[in-house]
Image (cartoon, rainbow, N blue to C red):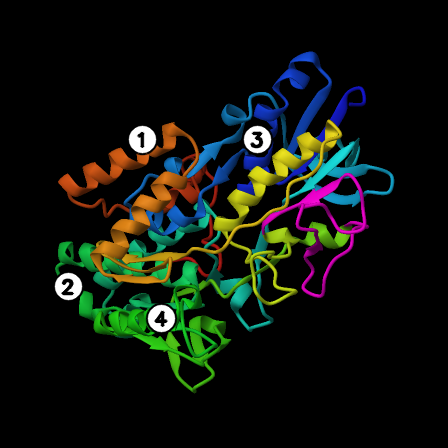
Amino acid sequence: MKERARILVVGGGYVGMYTALGLQRKLKPELRRGDVEIVVVTPDPYMTYQPFLPEAAAGSISPRHVVVPLRRVLDQCRVVIGEAASIDHAKRTATLTTLATEEEGTGPEQITYDELVLAPGSVSRTLPIPGLAEYAIGFKTVEEAIGLRNHVIEQMDIASSTRDPAIRDAALTFVFVGGGYAGVEALGELEDMARYAARYYHNVKADDMKWILVEASNRILPEVGEDMGKYTVTQLRRRNIDVRLETRLDSCADRVAVLSDGARFPTRTVVWTAGVKPHPVLAATDLPLNERGRLKCTAQLTVDGTTHAWAAGDAAAVPDVTAAEPGTETAPNAQHAVRQAKVLAENIARSLRGEPLETYAHKYVGSVASLGLHKGVAFVYGRKLKGYPAWFMHRTYHLSRVPTFNRKARVLAEWILSGLFKREIVSLGSLEHPRAEFELAAGGKPPQNPKGSS
C-alpha cells in the first residue's frame, strides 16, 4: 500500500455512510498507523433513513430517530459538511464548497485524493409545470416530511376557522403526484394521521377532506407486482382517496391543480414525488455516464474504463449479474444500495492491498410498502401479503435495516409507546421561522410566509 492513501467519499447517504463505515472496520490497522485517511463530503451531518420518512410525517417516529449522526458513526473519518462542485479524476482533484466558503470569501477549495467513491445519491426529478416551483413540496428529506406534517395540520386549522367555503375547500384538498413508494406511503400515512386528527375538530370531519393521487402510468407501486398494485388502488379508493391513473399534473399555478383529464382542484397542498434523477455533480466530472446520466460501472463497482474510481447506489449503473436478460442493471433502491456499499468497502480495501475484487451479485427479493397504520402490501420471495401481515413485515424489515443499535432501540420504543398512547396532532410550523416573534417584538416586520405555505 502506498504511503498515506486518501479515500474521498462524496455523499453521506446509504452508500456513502455504509462504505465509510465498512472501510473503518476493514482498514483499522492502516488507519491506526496513519497509512489511510478517509474523507467524507456530505451536505448534511447525518444520514436519513428514507423509508421511515412517511412515519415521521405521520408522527409515529420522532424526526431525530430517522437520521443517523455521521460524526458519531464515522469516528475514524474526517467528515466535511459541504458539496463537491466538480471532480477532475484525471488529476485526482475535487472542488468543494463548504459552510465556510462564503464566509471566507476565498472561493471553493480543492482536495486531492487517491481513491474516489461517488455516492451523491439522487435529486427530485421535476418538470416545467406552471406553479410547481412556487407551490409544491417534495418528499425526500426529513425537513420536507416534518414540514408537510405541519402544513397538513395547519390546513385543517385554517378550514376549521374560516367562514369562506372556497378557502375551506382548498385547505382540505391534498394532491399527491407520483404513485411510487414515496407518494403512496406518504399519502397513506398522512391521510391516516389527518383522519385521526379530525376527531378533535368540532367542524372538520374526515369525509370533508379530499385526497388525490395522480399517476402518469396505468399502475402504482410497480415494485410489489401488478396484483398488489391493483389491490392498493382498491384499498385507497375504499378510504375515499381519489386515485387517477394515466393522468398528469398540467399546472398548479394560482393554487389550482389542473390535471390532464380536465379536472381542476383548488388546493393549498401539492406534494411532488414523481421520480428522481442523478445528482448534478455527476455531470461535473470527467467520468463516463450512460444515457440516463448515471455512472457506467462494472459488477465490481468500479467506474467502467477508469481506475481508482468507485460508485454504487442511485448514482451508479451497475450490471445485474443475477438477471436472465443481459444488459439488465440493478434497481436504484435501498435494498441494493446497502448491499453494494458492503461490497464496495471490501473491494476498496482489497484494491489497496493488491488483492482480487469481489463481484456484486444480489437477486432482488421483493418489496414491502406501508399504507398507514396496520395497513400494507408486500411481495417477497414470490409471496403476496396484504393488510396487517404486510404492515408488520414492513416494520420488521426496516427496523432490522435502520443503522445502529441506538436507532433501532429508539424507533422500537416509540412504536411501543405509540401503541399505548394516542397520536400527537400538534403542528410546529413556527419552527420554520424561529425568530419571527422576537423580530416583531424588537420592532421588525412580521415575516412573510413563503409561496405555497399557509
Between 317 and 174, the one lying in front of the other is 317
| Structural crowding at the residue carrying mark 1, measured as other residues with C-alpha within 10 Å and reported as few (<14), some (14–19) or many (≥20) | few
Quadrant of the rendered structure where residue 191 is? bottom left
For residue 203, the mark is: 2
3D distance between C-alphas at marks 3 and 2: 54 Å
Q: Picture coordinates of residue 270 (x, y %)? A: 42, 66
Q: In this picture, which residue range is highlighted in magenta?
A: 285-313
Task: From the image, tell me which residue sits under label 1.
Answer: 409
Q: Picture coordinates of residue 328 (x, y %)? A: 61, 63
Task: From the image, tell me which residue sits under label 3.
Answer: 22
Q: Which numbered disc flags the more N-terminal residue, 1 or 4? A: 4
Image check: 294 left or right of 430?
A: right
For residue 229, the mark is: 4
3D distance between C-alphas at marks 4 and 2: 35 Å
Residue shown at 73% from the left, 18% from the top: 35
Q: Which numbered disc flags the more N-terminal residue, 3 or 1? A: 3
For mark 1, give the secondary structure: helix
Whether residue 305 is in magenta: the answer is: yes
Q: Amino acid at mark 4?
A: Gly
